[in-house]
Amino acid sequence: MPRHGWIQDPHTSDTKRFHADEKSWHRDPRVFVDSGRPLPGQPPLLKNRVHLRRETAELLWRELLRVGWRTCEPQWGSDADI
């Protein structure tokens, strides 16, 4: 899992954005995982955000790939709010 990445379920368009928590990265690496769904012509439907230890986020990333999710391009801007 990269420090920043996007992954999407090709069947439902559910999307997760993984991005490093820069404030904690050097002492206790943590990752924010934002979940949502892009909506054509509208702001995305952002559902939640979790704050995970890097190791847990890496496990989640690998598990999603294992069950068929695929990496994707960014689906919403950083200005979108949960």
Image (spheres, grey):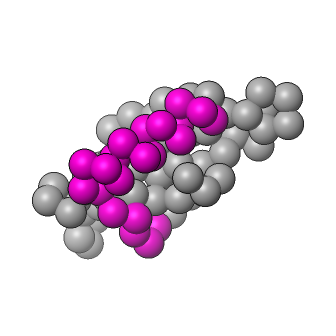
Q: Position of residue 68 (x, y in %)?
A: 24, 56
Q: Position of residue 32 (x, y in %)?
A: 57, 39
Quadrant of the image containing the C terminus: top left
Compared with 22, 39 (above or below) is below
Q: Residue furthest front?
A: 66
Q: Residue furthest left?
A: 11
Query: As rendered, which of 19 and 70 lies closer to the eye?
Result: 70
Q: Main secondary structure of the magenta part?
A: helix
Range shown magenta: 54-74
Residue 63 is inside the magenta segment: yes
Residue 80 placement, left or right of 11: right
Query: Is residue 50 among the parts visible in the rendering?
Result: yes
Q: Residue at x 73, y 34 (%)?
A: 29
Q: Position of residue 10 (x, y in %)?
A: 21, 63
Q: Residue at x 47, y 52 (%)?
A: 17
Compared with 69, 25 (above or below) is above
